[in-house]
């Protein structure tokens, strides 16, 4: 448990995660198996979703929250089958709408830990509007976006994160769309918590999930996820042991931003950031990562370090800035109204001001 | 000078002016005065969708019609007895609705050559014979208001703006209305602007005094209070009654109210109203779009709230996918559709009954939902309580079809005895219901066919639901052909069985030998009832029934239809209920359909009924 760095409303209890401040605690020593449902998992062999599911199931006991107070909400797509495989409460909803449904649930039930599972098609295409609004509103939900850069469940069309020129069934001579960078998009919506991780790196994935749960308000986590059927090895350069350490920029709050042994991130022109040889620029010019910067501009500049061929890709927490959550503010308004004027009286309400009596 | 007082049994007044002239406020205040005096009343606001159409133009005309009487009345009235026309545009737009002999009070100050030209009056209608046959009172409303405020510091522009209060004062004198309510209303409204308050009060009194002293108005009128059933009354619009009904439903069910909504005419007032009632634990969420509004409501329902969304036709279309999810997940959800003229954007501020088939059939798959409709502004309260009862008891989305006329129209409402409102039992699941301590989320109640409702936070009942077809008991994903057939039929059977839980048809047939039945639904109740009264007064025999429940229909509807030779179904659409009745009961009902964005006129409907009665 890290201390709240921003001086905004701090964690409510010392042993728990701040994002779970209003969620009951349990002493039950859950194991990973306690979060497996009795349903047969039906993803394709080799799908990255298996790794994410296993990491998530083994992570949930860390929350220290009763199983019945955890709710998974998903949309439509391969990743959205996720809730069926967890023994928590769950809603497998409709395409793109999970953030909206989770918003209603989380604002009316602050005692729940609510997780949205979505994909690049579900979250960025049909549901893009709900995603950005959930982020700007800062509802206390955790949004995990599995990005495989392809439509899987509809069998292989290009997605809003596919690289331009992608040859698919619906783009036989190459797709024409410019893709979204999901992290840049979330930061554009001024999300308080934005992170990226990779399906195959369980340790990193788990640390990011924990940080997301710790964040009160909307957390957005992009998870690079391999689709072995329609877009296999889409992230291979980031997974191949011989190249990944030269490409993955592992961000740690307070630490210099280094990329492999020789390179690092320095300030560039117009407020941007650049990758440079440390030997040329000197150790002192390396940027020390500050996830708590109020201005999202720095995190945005980090997200722009991405390159189409994955020459350098930041992973970890881009931004972790706390501000009051929508659900807290809404529930405060209700409590304030009640403490100032008492609980509503239905009879008095109906009578209103101007009545008359007929004998 | 002692003035003559004439007794009347009823009057229809229409205030008409520019959108910026404050006609809605004027009408509303006159209505409140009339309500507190004890008349029965019915109102019809009619305004453009544009917030401020160009001043003085025909599309910018806003009007408010009020019918009040010493007896119980059903409609805002077919044709005004009195028109208050604040400018040439208001005169031109409304003149055609007036019967000869009607009174026109006209603000002469606005009849300049330029203003007249703007609406196509070549010569002055006040003098060129256009108004022959009407009783015209030409009054300089603007100049007299400015003169009355000459001694104040207020700007000329602000002084001119108070002319609606002068008009209100004059009409209040003419009809001997109590004025205390308006005085205290103005004091509250302009509490922080003492100069504006003083100007409005002065203008209001000046209008009253002008009526009392001028020789132009020799007579004032008295309409005695109506003899309504005993009780405490208030005046209420449909949208306000809907909001109150939802709060009452929340209280009676013990479920916190969650409204997910996106602003849309003419439904927004329900969102506005509910956002003011946080003391009742009401959470209102202004969503990014219609889809998110209903999505959040359904999410709240999953969490154990009473999830509600409010909208009008164009928003209803967008919500249907989520309504389908609510059908599949079998969660309570209330969808209030305040119908307006369509298709597409249509005429946002005008009324229609054209969403019935969409409510019933506008979703993919076999997707049955109960549909209820209020019959008058005050009845919106009871309809909302009933929607809550059905949604919670049967774990189902329920559509309530209000309309623009009900939403903005008002009438006296006898306050209900709160303790006698229905008790609504959410009966949340707390214990396992399956073998070996398992929870089967689709194991149904044998009586209601409703599934159990376990909300997150309930230990041991963790389960997953969603839009994919479910196994009939466990709720697990199932693509088995037989299971799907069973589930489709079960969802239908659950809704159909609600027919056992709603009242039988109430048919009004005083002579007991009518051959013609008139059957309506929703907001046409007032017009149809007024038409039926006319026919009966003239010696005609006609039976009348009105549907609250559009799905399922009352169990005895078919029997009722078949017991009359002819059935007339008036609708403000091209025959949507008629289509259902023909399809369901093989009864060749006679449709009467007009889609003008306005309620039916009683006289016109009476003519239609008489014509059908006279058929061999």
Image (cartoon, coloured by chain):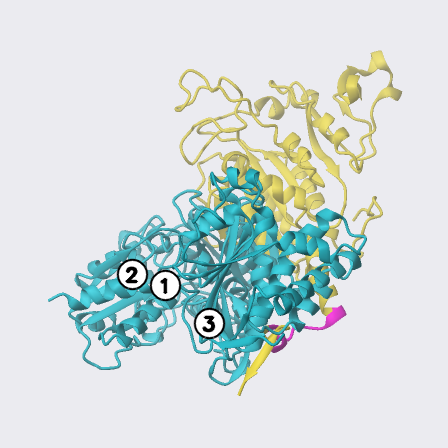
Q: Residue B202: where, in percent of width, then height?
A: 72, 62
At mark 1, the secondary structure is helix
Q: On the image, numbered disc 3 is attached to which residue?
A: B382
Of pointers 2 and 3, the one earlier in the residue sequence: 3
Of pointers 3 and 1, the one earlier in the residue sequence: 3
Colour used to depict chain A in the structure image: yellow
Q: Which chain is cyan?
A: B
At mark 2, the secondary structure is strand
Indicate which label's residue lies in the foreground, 3 or 1.
1
Q: Which mark is residue B524?
A: 1
Quarter of the image with the N terminus of chain B is bottom right
Query: What's drawn in magenta, residue-wise?
Result: A339-349
Q: CA gap, disc 2 to disc 1?
A: 8 Å
Host chain of mark 1:
B
Q: Which mark is residue B251?
A: none
Q: How many marks?
A: 3
Q: On the image, numbered disc 2 is attached to which residue?
A: B570
Q: Is residue A156 above or below residue A91?
A: above
For the view shown, which residue lies furthest in the right direction? A284
């Amino acid at each position: 448990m890290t201390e709240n760095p921003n001086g905004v409303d701090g964690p409510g209890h010392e042993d728990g995660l701040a994002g779970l401040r209003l969620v009951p605690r349990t002493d039950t020593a859950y194991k990973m198996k306690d979060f497996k449902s009795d349903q047969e998992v039906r993803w394709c062999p080799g799908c990255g979703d298996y790794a994410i599911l296993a990491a998530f199931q083994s992570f949930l006991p860390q929350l220290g929250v009763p199983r019945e107070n955890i709710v998974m909400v998903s949309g439509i797509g391969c990743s959205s089958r996720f809730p069926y495989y967890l023994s928590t409460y769950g809603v497998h909803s409709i395409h793109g709408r999970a953030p909206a449904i989770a918003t209603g649930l989380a604002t009316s039930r602050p005692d729940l830990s609510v997780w949205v599972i979505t994909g690049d098609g579900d979250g960025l295409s049909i549901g893009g509007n709900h995603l950005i609004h959930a982020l700007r509103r800062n509802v206390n939900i955790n949004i995990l976006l599995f990005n495989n850069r392809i439509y899987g469940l509809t069998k292989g069309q290009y997605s809003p994160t596919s690289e331009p020129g992608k040859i698919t069934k619906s783009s036989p001579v190459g797709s024409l769309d410019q893709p979204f960078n999901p992290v840049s998009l979330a930061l554009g919506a001024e999300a308080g918590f934005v992170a990226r991780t990779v399906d195959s790196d369980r340790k990193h994935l788990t640390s990011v999930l924990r940080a997301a749960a710790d964040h009160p308000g909307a957390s957005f986590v992009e998870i690079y996820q391999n689709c072995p059927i329609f877009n296999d090895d889409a992230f291979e350069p980031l997974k191949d042991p011989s190249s990944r350490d030269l490409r993955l920029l592992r961000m740690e709050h307070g630490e210099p931003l280094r990329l492999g042994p020789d390179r690092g991130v320095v300030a560039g022109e117009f407020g941007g950031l650049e990758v440079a040889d440390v030997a040329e620029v000197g150790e002192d010019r390396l940027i020390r990562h500050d996830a708590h910067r109020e201005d999202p501009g720095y995190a945005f500049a980090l997200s722009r370090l991405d390159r189409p061929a994955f020459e350098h890709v930041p992973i970890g927490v881009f931004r972790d800035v706390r501000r009051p959550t929508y659900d807290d503010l809404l529930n405060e308004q209700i409590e304030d109204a009640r403490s100032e004027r008492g609980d509503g009286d239905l009879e008095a309400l109906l009578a209103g001001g101007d009545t008359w009596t007929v004998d | 000078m002692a003035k003559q007082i004439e007794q009347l049994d009823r009057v229809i007044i229409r205030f008409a002016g520019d959108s910026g002239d404050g006609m809605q406020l004027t009408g509303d205040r006159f209505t409140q005065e009339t309500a507190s005096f004890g008349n029965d009343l019915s109102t019809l606001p009619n305004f453009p969708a544009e917030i401020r159409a160009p001043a003085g133009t025909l599309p910018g005309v806003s009007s408010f019609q009020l019918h009040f009487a010493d007896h119980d009345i059903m409609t805002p009235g077919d044709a005004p007895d009195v028109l208050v026309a604040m400018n040439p545009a208001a005169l031109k737009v409304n003149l055609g609705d007036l019967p000869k002999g009607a009174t026109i009070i006209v603000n002469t100050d606005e009849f300049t050559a330029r203003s007249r030209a703007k609406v196509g009056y070549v010569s002055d209608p006040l003098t060129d014979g256009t108004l022959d046959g009407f009783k015209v009172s030409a009054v300089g409303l603007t100049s007299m208001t400015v003169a009355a405020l000459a001694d104040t510091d207020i700007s000329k522009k602000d002084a001119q703006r108070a002319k609606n209060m002068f008009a209100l004062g004059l009409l209040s004198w003419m009809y001997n209305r109590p004025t205390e309510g308006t005085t205290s209303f103005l004091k509250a409204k302009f509490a922080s602007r003492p100069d504006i308050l003083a100007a409005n009060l002065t203008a209001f009194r000046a209008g009253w005094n002008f009526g009392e002293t001028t020789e132009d108005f020799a007579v004032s009128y008295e309409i005695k209070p109506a003899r309504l059933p005993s009780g405490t009354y208030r005046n209420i619009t449909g949208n306000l009654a809907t909001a109150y009904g939802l709060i009452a439903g929340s209280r009676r069910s013990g479920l916190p109210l969650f409204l997910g909504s996106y602003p849309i005419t003419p439904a927004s007032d329900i969102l506005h109203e509910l956002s003011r009632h946080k003391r009742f634990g009401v959470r209102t969420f202004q969503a990014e779009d219609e889809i998110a509004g209903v999505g959040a409501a359904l999410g709240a329902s999953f969490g154990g709230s009473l999830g509600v969304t409010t909208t009008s036709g164009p928003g209803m279309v967008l919500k249907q996918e989520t309504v389908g999810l609510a059908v599949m997940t079998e969660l309570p959800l209330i969808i209030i559709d305040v119908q307006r003229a369509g298709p597409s954007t249509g005429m946002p501020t005008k009324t229609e009954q054209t969403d019935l088939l969409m409510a019933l059939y506008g979703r993919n798959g076999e997707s049955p939902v109960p549909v209820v409709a209020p019959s008058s502004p005050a009845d919106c309260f009871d309809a909302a309580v009933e929607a809550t009862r059905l949604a919670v008891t049967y774990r189902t989305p329920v559509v309530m079809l209000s309309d623009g006329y009900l939403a903005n129209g008002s009438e006296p409402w006898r306050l209900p005895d709160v303790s006698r409102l229905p008790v609504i039992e959410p009966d949340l699941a707390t214990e396992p219901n399956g073998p070996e301590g398992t929870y089967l989320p689709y194991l149904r109640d044998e009586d209601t066919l409703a599934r159990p409702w376990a909300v997150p936070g309930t230990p041991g009942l963790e389960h997953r639901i969603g839009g994919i077809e479910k196994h009939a008991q466990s709720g697990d994903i199932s693509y088995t052909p037989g299971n799907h057939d069973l589930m489709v039929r079960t969802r239908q059977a659950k809704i159909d069985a609600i027919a056992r839980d709603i009242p039988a048809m109430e048919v009004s047939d005083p002579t007991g030998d009518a051959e013609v039945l008139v059957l309506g639904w929703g907001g046409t109740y007032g017009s149809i009832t007024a038409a039926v009264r006319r026919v009966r007064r003239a010696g005609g025999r006609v039976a009348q029934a009105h549907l609250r429940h559009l799905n399922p229909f009352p169990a005895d509807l078919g029997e009722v239809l078949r017991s009359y030779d002819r059935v007339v179904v008036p609708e403000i659409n091209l025959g949507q209920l008629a289509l259902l009745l023909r399809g369901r009961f093989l009864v060749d009902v006679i449709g009467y359909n007009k889609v003008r964005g306005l309620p039916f006129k009683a006289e016109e409907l009476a003519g239609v009924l008489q014509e059908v009665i006279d058929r061999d």
